[in-house]
Image (cartoon, rainbow, N blue to C red):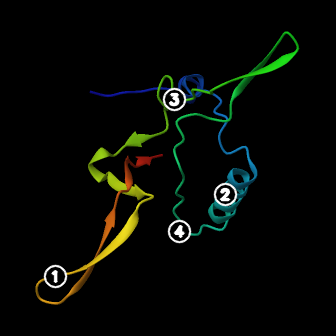
């Protein structure tokens, strides 16, 4: 089956995500742009935040913030790779113990784990 689309169709599907607009995001974008201009063989990694900056409105003279659900309809530029997911541990502590052969070991205890799923763009 052949699938054909136009750049305009993809542009219409992409919401303006409030991501990468902060100082570090802008720095990373400039760095990758420079690498591309110099034809350097680099790979960029980033965090895929569930929400962007935020949406704001004014009600009765007060600023109201709402999460920017930029992934509400998916993202047209990315491919999920759950087969390469890795467990990432946060917090906890390291406990040392000695086995019956006198070898010392260390084990990470009481961590809060998340499953990190890579997305390729």
Q: Position of residue 113 (x, y in %)?
A: 37, 51
Choose mark 3 or mark 1, whichever is in front: 1
Considering the numbered disc 3 on the image, is that residue within a helix, a strand or a loop? Answer: loop
**In the rendered structure, which disc, 2 or 1, sits on the residue that comes first in sequence?**
2
Question: Residue 91, relative to residue 48: is it above or below?
Answer: below
Left or right, residue 104 beside residue 89? left
Residue 71, which numbered label? 3
Left or right, residue 32 beside residue 61? left
Q: Nearer the viewer, residue 22 or 41?
A: 22
Q: Position of residue 58 (x, y in %)?
A: 82, 16
Tag 2 residue: 28
The residue located at (17%, 90%) in the rendering is 102
Considering the numbered disc 2 on the image, is that residue within a helix, a strand or a loop? Answer: helix
CA neighbours of label 2 inside 10 A, class few (<14), some (14 to 19), many (20+): some
Residue 13, which numbered label? none
* CA gap, disc 2 and disc 4: 15 Å
Considering the numbered disc 1 on the image, is that residue within a helix, a strand or a loop? Answer: loop
The quadrant the N terminus occupies is top left
Choose mark 2 or mark 1, whichever is in front: 1
Check whether the beta carbons of the residues at disc 4 and disc 1 lie within 8 A of each other.
Answer: no
**In the rendered structure, which disc, 4 or 1, sits on the residue that comes first in sequence?**
4
**In the rendered structure, which disc, 3 or 2, sits on the residue that comes first in sequence?**
2
CA neighbours of label 1 inside 10 A, class few (<14), some (14 to 19), many (20+): few
Q: Position of residue 8 (x, y in %)?
A: 59, 25
- All told, the count of numbered labels is 4
Considering the numbered disc 4 on the image, is that residue within a helix, a strand or a loop? Answer: loop
């Amino acid at each position: 089956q052949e699938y054909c689309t136009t750049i305009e169709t993809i542009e219409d599907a992409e919401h303006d995500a409030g991501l990468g607009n902060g100082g570090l995001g802008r720095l990373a974008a400039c760095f990758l742009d420079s690498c591309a201009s110099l034809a350097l063989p680099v790979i960029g990694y980033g965090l895929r935040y569930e929400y962007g900056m935020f949406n704001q409105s004014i009600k009765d003279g007060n600023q109201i913030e709402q999460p920017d659900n930029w992934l509400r309809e998916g993202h047209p530029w990315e491919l999920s790779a759950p087969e390469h997911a890795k467990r990432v541990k946060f917090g906890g502590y390291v406990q040392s113990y000695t086995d019956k052969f006198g070898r010392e070991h260390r084990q990470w205890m009481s961590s809060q784990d998340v499953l990190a799923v890579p997305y390729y763009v």
